[in-house]
Amino acid sequence: MKLLTVATFDNMPDAHIAKGRLEVEGIPCWLQDEHLGQTDWLYNIAVGWIKLQVEAEQLERARDILDTDYSNDIPADG
């Protein structure tokens, strides 16, 4: 199985939100180096941040999902 990086993040909350978006769409995914930056923030720079990875055949679908903006679908209060 070949894993490719679909996105990178400088913090764990954003990485986990993106991972959740892919998982709810049925795309298996993994976070690489997610805990390394917690030991020392400078490690994130050295390793290229937190990487969200998917199987190669899921890359384009994963990109489409992550590029979709749902913020206009949220109903306004009142």
Image: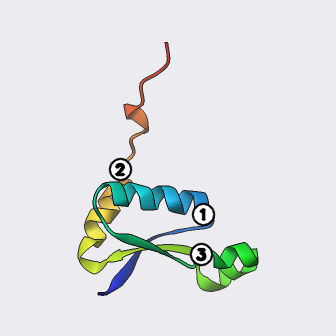
Query: As drawn, is 11 to the left or to the right of 55?
Result: right
Identified at 56% across, 73% down, the residue is 50
| Lower sequence index among marks 1 and 3 | 1
Q: Nearer the viewer, mark 1 or mark 3?
A: 1
Query: Whole-percent x and y of residue 28?
Result: 33, 69
Q: Quadrant of residue 1?
A: bottom left
Q: Is residue 36 visible?
A: yes
Element type at mark 2: loop
Query: As drawn, is 20 to the left or to the right of 60?
Result: right
Q: Amino acid at mark 1?
A: Met
| Residue at the top extreme, as displayed | 78
Give the residue pinned by disc 2.
68
Q: Amino acid at mark 3?
A: Trp
Give the residue pinned by disc 3.
49
Which sits in the foreground, 48 or 26? Answer: 26
Query: Whole-percent x and y of residue 72?
Result: 40, 33
